Amino acid sequence: MFEGFTEQMVDANGLSLFVRHGGSGSAVLLLHGHPRTSATWHRVAPRLIEQGLTVICADLPGYGRSGKPEPTRDHAAHSKRSGARHLLNAMTELGHDEFAVVGHDRGSYYALRMALDHPDRVTRVALLDCLPISEHLDRTDARFATAWWHWFFFAQPDIPERVINADPDAWYHGDPDSMGEENFAEWRTAIHDPDVVRGMLEDYRAGLGIDADHERADRAAGRRIGQPLLVLWSTRDDLEDLYGDPLVVWRDWADHVTGHGIDSGHHLAEQAPDELARALTPFLIPGR
């Protein structure tokens, strides 16, 4: 897994982030979702390197082997704005002043925040299985609350930690055949670490509060994604079922939106790596 990649801890302005990187050419930062680590990209990252890209896969702040911010009452330490700064500093330390970013699931919210807050650094952004958090919350109905109940459960104090840590394997249902044995082993180590579980839950707690507030402030101020935006989603997940065409929603947030669904379950990078790499390559390398 990740043969030829360099693995290292990078000092990201007071928080150490675990990264894997390799390749040459223009840089792309890949950000995983919950409850994965950067290892989820192990089938996609080599394909992108073959196309002539430098690929950086990072464990999100609070996840995997990355540093764990100390929780705060307002959850600001785990906000996407704070995490985006740490990720940006890590890319600076690795020598990348400009780069594209691809985010899946929770990682997409860090990618969105980087694109909005740091347009001088982020050249292109691809968001997978994602709508803005505030869009989900402002459209919440019984269907959404039933299907995505975990958002609201994770926001509760203390109880989710006790439930998950009592039996992480029963809660998260990993499959080594689907994930790949090494990816599965890394993921399983992470979910058995109470500090990781707390970090992941704080990510969701920030999402329902400070992150949604930041997004609404962006909308009120008329801030939009000016970079090219690629939106991809899993057709066997429920984003289309809940909202129809995700591109319609994203056109209220970005100036240049393209995208389509991919025949896959939620974990695109593990379940449909060829299709995902084929969709990403011409976007990340225009003219390819």
Image: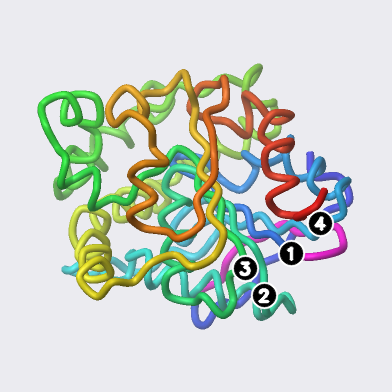
Q: Nearer the viewer, mark 2 or mark 3?
A: 3
N-terminal of the pair, mark 1 or mark 4, is 1
With respect to residue 72, does 174 lie above or below?
above
Give the residue pinned by disc 3. 123
Tell which of 83 and 197 is nearer to you: 83
Q: Where's the N terminus, which quadrant? A: top right
Q: Is residue 114 magenta?
A: no
N-terminal of the pair, mark 3 or mark 1, is 1
Chain part drawn in magenta: 15-26
Query: Callout 2, which amino acid?
Result: Glu
Give the residue pinned by disc 1. 27
Query: Callout 4, which amino acid?
Result: Leu
The colour scheme used here is rainbow
Give the residue pinned by disc 2. 98
N-terminal of the pair, mark 2 or mark 3, is 2
Tell me residue 40's x, y (percent): 62, 39
Tell me residue 91's x, y (percent): 64, 73
N-terminal of the pair, mark 4 or mark 3, is 4
Q: CA distance from mark 1 to mark 2?
A: 7 Å
Tell which of 284 and 3 is nearer to you: 284
**Mark 4 and 3 residues: CB-CB less than 8 Å, in contact?**
no
Q: CA distance from mark 4 to mark 3?
A: 14 Å
Q: CA distance from mark 2 to mark 3?
A: 6 Å
Say which element carries label 1.
strand
- Horizontal side of 146 relative to 120 (left or right) equals left
**Mark 2 and 3 residues: CB-CB less than 8 Å, in contact?**
yes
Give the residue pinned by disc 4. 53
